[in-house]
Image (cartoon, helix red, strand yellow):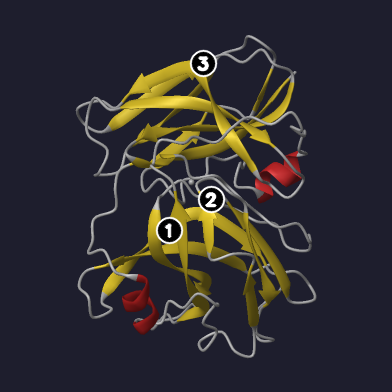
Amino acid sequence: MRRVLAAIAGLSLGLAVLAAPAHADQGVTLTAKQLTQAGFTKKPNVVSWEPGTASLSAHRVAQWQDVVITGKAPNFTPTGQLLTLQRFIPSDTQGSGTFKDLNITTSVNPNGSFVMHMQLGYVGTYGYRVGYSTDGPSPEFIGFQFQLAVTGDSTASPQGSANAVILTSRQLARAGFTRSPNVVGWGGTATISRSAAPAGAPITISGTAPDFVAPGAVMQMSRFVGTDKKGSGHLEKLPISTKVRSDRTFELTFELNVPGTYGYGLGVDGQYEWVGIEFQVTTT
C-alpha cells in the first residue's frame, strides 16, 4: 500500500492502491484538534499548494471505504508530475514529525487536474499530505495536507467484488504494478527474471528486504483484483510465499497459470498495513 506507485502522464484516470493491514507506525497520537493546529485540517489545507486546489470526498470513513481526492495542481506543476500520498507520523504534540509514503499516487493531467482514489485499513484519525518534492540541492515539498478519520476495529479486510475488471498493462502500470518491480513503498530492492512467460514457466523474483522486515518474515504473494478502470481494487493472497533470509535477502521462484496480464504483490503483513513490492506479469 503502491503504493504505490508509478503513473503515466496524459491519462485522466485516478489512481488507488489498497494498503492492507502491516507494521504499526511509531509516533505520538494527536487529537483532531491538535492535528488541525498542526495544519492538518478536515478541509484540505492548500496554503502551500496555491494557486492549486484540492477537495476531499469525506473526512470520516469506514475502514476500506473509497475516498476520492480531486483538484488542480498549481500552474507551474509539470504535466505527468507524480503526486504521492503520505501519512504524518508525529513525534510530539507540537506538530513535529515525519512522513511515511503510503504507496498511493496519481499524476497531473495535461489540464492540471488530478484524481486520487484510496482505501485505508489504518484505523484512527491521522494527518496526511499529497504532493511532490522539487529537485535541486534544497528540495521543497509542494502539496496540501488534511486529516482523515478511519473508523473500525482494525479487523476488517478488503472484500472481493463481483464487478472485478481487467486492466490493461498501461492501467496496471498507472496503479503501480509496473513490469520492473515497483519498490517505492518497500524500501528494499527487487528484480524479476521476466515480466512475460508461458503458463507454467518459472519466474524468479529476488532482492533485499528493508531494515524493519525481520529475517524469517514470510513474504506472501498476491494477485491484484481491480474493481474499476481507475486502479481501485484489492490484493487476493495466492498460495505462494518465501521467507527473508538471515542476511535480509530473499528469492522466490514461482509459476503462473492464469492467462492474461495481471498485477501482483509480494510483501509482508503486519498489524496495520501491507508493505511490499508490486509488479505485473503477462502469462500466455
Say whether residue 43 is left or right of residue 228: left
Q: Is residue 48 above or below residue 145?
A: below
Give the crowd class for mark 1: few <14, some 14-19, many >=20 residues within 10 Å: many
Type of amino acid under label 3: Phe
Alpha carbon separation for disc pair 2 and 1? 8 Å
Q: Which mark is residue 1?
A: none
Q: Position of residue 239 (x, y in %)?
A: 49, 14
Instruction: From the image, state whether disc 3 or disc 2 is nearer to you.
Output: 2
Residue bearing mark 1: 101
Alpha carbon separation for disc pair 3 and 2? 23 Å
Please identify the residue farthest to the top as the structure is shown.
200
Query: In terms of secondary structure, where does tag 1 sit?
Result: strand
Residue bearing mark 2: 4
Q: Is residue 141 above or below residue 80?
A: below
Query: In terms of secondary structure, where does tag 2 sit?
Result: loop
Specify the quadrant of the image occupied by residue 196. top right
Q: Position of residue 255 (x, y in %)?
A: 57, 13
Say whether residue 94 is left or right of residue 275: left
Number of dots carrying numbers: 3
First in residue order: circle 2 vs circle 1? 2
Instruction: From the image, state whether disc 3 or disc 1 is nearer to you.
Output: 1
Whether label 3 touches label 1, CB < 8 Å: no
Residue bearing mark 3: 254
Type of amino acid under label 1: Asp
Whether label 2 touches label 1, CB < 8 Å: yes
